[in-house]
Image: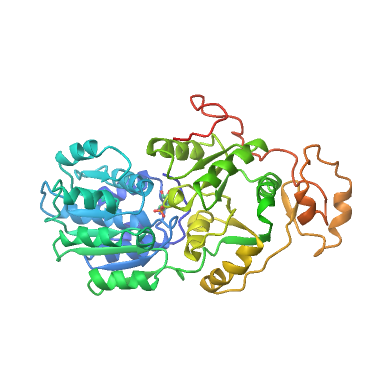
Amino acid sequence: MSKATATTNVDFSTLGLDDTLLKAVQEAGYKKPTPVQAKAIPMALTGRDMMASAQTGTGKTASFTLPILQRLSQMKASNAVRALVLVPTRELALQVFESFKTYGKHTELKTVAVFGGVDIEEQLTALSKGADILVATPGRLADMINRKHIQLTNLRILVLDEADRMLDLGFKDDIERILKNAPVKRQNLLFSATFSKDIKQLAHDFMRHPVKVEIENPNSAAKTVKQSFYPVDQPDKPEILSYLINGGKFKKALVFVRTKKAANRIAELLEEDGINAQPIHSDINQYQRVRTLEDFKDGYFDVLVATDVAARGLDIEQLPLVINFDLPKVPQDYVHRIGRTGRAGQPGRAIALINPEEKKHLLPSLQKLLNRPIEIEPLPYFEDGEVRPNESETPAAKPRNRGRKPDPKAKKPAIKKYAGKTTGKRGGSKPATGAARGARRPSAPSGSKRKS
Ligand code: AMP
């Protein structure tokens, strides 16, 4: 568990949680609840339906795991699933499962996670031993219900986590199929980064007068994230990407691309530029995805190149930088992507590389969603890892830069096209700073991407 900085002055002890749970929270190292926890936990404990706008990184998982653990502990024990958490991806399923284990370690409650892409038999065996709480992706669970492997007749609490994403991924029918098998009298909790029309419709369809918990404008990207948009032609993007990562001396970065192929290719190109990078996408098998993520967290490589589906719900603590190599087709995905930096009140940085097509076709809708004008800035140059404004903005910056030796590795011409006005050099000659640069996990195939 990361120790994200909480941003309220409220004490956990005032939220109505039992001592066993407070103990687990304390052992997780949390000092104060985050804003969504401070509002959502007491509300969820009342048993009312609730819809909360909360992005990944806000501490939303504890906002429903803690009340579920408490409410189930107070109910009569049974051998049947009484709480179900539906999540869009396997990664999120595993993270939510881990949260239940962490916060529920002083309780007797059992949690099982089921998700696609792995052998169903093992999950069925786990289920047959009894589960109070089930964390599931909708496809796999609908399949299990269909085959009569599982019953939801005792369900008391349902959570739709990252509901907007589940709809984006086309899980609406599966969700409906699953809910047909559950009792109507239950508590429903819905978490979503955005309250789009579709989400409101979903809430209307299956919730009863939900209380709304809104932490900040769900469509506004985290306030602590500084966002920059740089104009770059598509073929030049890989070079500019290395330039930005190296020059800014970012210790870690998450790069978003649109396709699996691009994730592999960009990770390879970054490696060629001396930046340790790994791809993560849905063609990489589950074991390797989890392992890649762990390696990233542990600092065995510095840049994770991800597709939206693979990155959704990844619990990556405190990323200093998110780069949108491609702008997502769905503007909401931009908000999700940059939610990976500036988490729990920490400052963050988000950069988007915008080609002319993206500027024309995708920026207008993003601008509308963010509800503010997007300024396309000239590419910055870097001095000692510090961003300096382009000389067109600050003429005085030029003399400071004159004494710099040309970078021997500055073999590629694209930088000149964008930042050339100011420096004509690559931003940083050294590879990005990660202390662990080159310090690969010994068992990892050396220098290779872990493709499935
Ligand atoms: P989530 O938004 O649930 O994915 O949580 C984001 C990260 O914040 C996770 O790594 C949590 O372990 C961490 N976190 C959650 N609540 C707190 C808290 N109250 N104080 C510090 N860190 C927290």
Dividing the picture into quadrants, the one containing residue 118 is top left
Q: Residue furthest top?
A: 442
Split into 4 quadrants, where in the image is the C terminus? Answer: top left
List x then y, in percent, for residue 282.
42, 45
Please name whichever residue, 132 or 330, is drawn nearer the observer in this view of the structure. Answer: 330
List x then y, in percent, for residue 23.
31, 47
Please name whichever residue, 317 or 392, is drawn nearer the observer in this view of the structure. Answer: 392
Dividing the picture into quadrants, the one containing residue 44 is bottom left
Q: Is residue 439 left or right of residue 401?
A: left
Q: Is residue 168 above or below residue 289?
A: below
List x then y, in percent, for residue 164.
38, 63
Q: Residue at x 81, y 54 (%)?
A: 420
Q: Residue at x 63, y 66 (%)?
A: 359
Split into 4 quadrants, where in the image is the N terminus? Answer: top left
Please name whichever residue, 430 or 356, is drawn nearer the observer in this view of the structure. Answer: 356
List x then y, in percent, for residue 349.
60, 56
Q: Is residue 205 left or right of residue 337?
A: left
